Image (cartoon, rainbow, N blue to C red):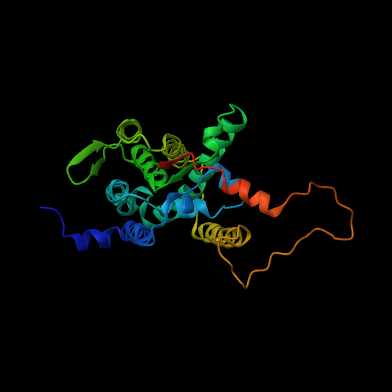
Amino acid sequence: MGKPLLFEILEKPVTSCIIGICSAIWFYIQKKNIGYSNIGLSYETAIEGHHWRIITSAFSHISVIHLVFNMSALWSLGVVEKLGHMGLGIEFYLHYTLVLVILSGALVLGMYHVLIQRFKLEYFRRVTAVGYSCVVFGWMTILAVKQPSSKLDLFGFLSLPISFAPFESLIFTSIIVPQASFLGHLSGIIVGYAIAWGLIHGMTNYWALSMLGWVVVVFMFSLKRSGTFDFSFIEIENVTDPSLPSVGFLASGTGRTLQMSAIPLVGGELV
């Protein structure tokens, strides 16, 4: 007989909080009828300055199945919080969850950039990704390296050897869920290996708080600059000197607006 749920929650406080946050955001998205194009991450919105989407896309889920699958896997991976004796534990989990959210999102954009600019695959310009799977796949990979004897439990009845779970899940989700973001999941695995092998290391409370502070600053300024949310206490001044001559192309604001709004959303991916 397993432990009571309350004890499990107390043993996995960070995991429990993240599941609560993702569930609350999912409920809000459903209630307000918000589409993935409004909060998801795409190459096109990133180059337009919507850097805040790296955060919102990670914690947002559109369908209940998408939410349940990611949160079920995350709950099992929350065992990392109890492995302080192995150099993991709650602090490690907090520090590198932040790293996984930021770096996996940035790596996805980097992959899109290469596919678009080098291979001319314009499809990836407007592919929009949402979901916490980048982080889930990252923790699967870290646990597979640090404790390969562990098991990954899904939905309470499906159990996978953690040593094979990252790539098994990558192939499984790509086949079963065609909309699943292969590149998003792969980016989580790559960042996960970089952390597990010590290529990314040295995170302390100081560096984690510093990183979090910069994330908050960039998040707020990108919201302001992109016009998504108006922070009245933030003023972004134009650094161009009006006394200097300038060369540029003149275009009608209305024409530009119509052109941008006419671009269709090609597709969405679940991560």
- Look at the picture and state if 142 lies above or below 235: above
Quadrant in which residue 241 is drawn: bottom right
Q: Residue at x 32, y 58 (%)?
A: 23
Q: Residue placed at 72% from the left, 51% from the top?
A: 252
Residue 79: x percent and y percent?
29, 50
- Name which quarter of the figure residue 109 lies in: top right
Q: Position of residue 225 (x, y in %)?
A: 63, 59
- For the residue pair 117 and 193, the one nearer the viewer reads as 117
Is there any visible trace of residue 243 in the rendered image? Answer: yes
Q: Residue furthest bottom?
A: 233
Can you tell which quarter of the image residue 173 is in?
top left
Camera sees residue 48: no
Q: Is residue 217 above or below residue 126?
A: below
Decide which of 251, 202 is in the foreground and name it: 251
- Could you say which is closer to the camera, residue 173 or residue 74? 173
Query: On the rendered image, what quadrant is the C terminus found in?
Result: top left
Asked whether 81 or 136 is in front, the reply is 136
Residue at 49% across / 60% down in the picture? 205
Residue name at image x 45 percent, y 44 percent: 129
Residue 46 percent location from the top left of the image: 58, 47
142 to the left or right of 110: left
How many numbered marks appear? Answer: 0
Left or right of 211 on screen, residue 66: left
250 sits to left or right of 128:
right
Q: Residue 154: horizontal and vertical position, in percent?
A: 24, 43
| Outermost residue to the top | 119
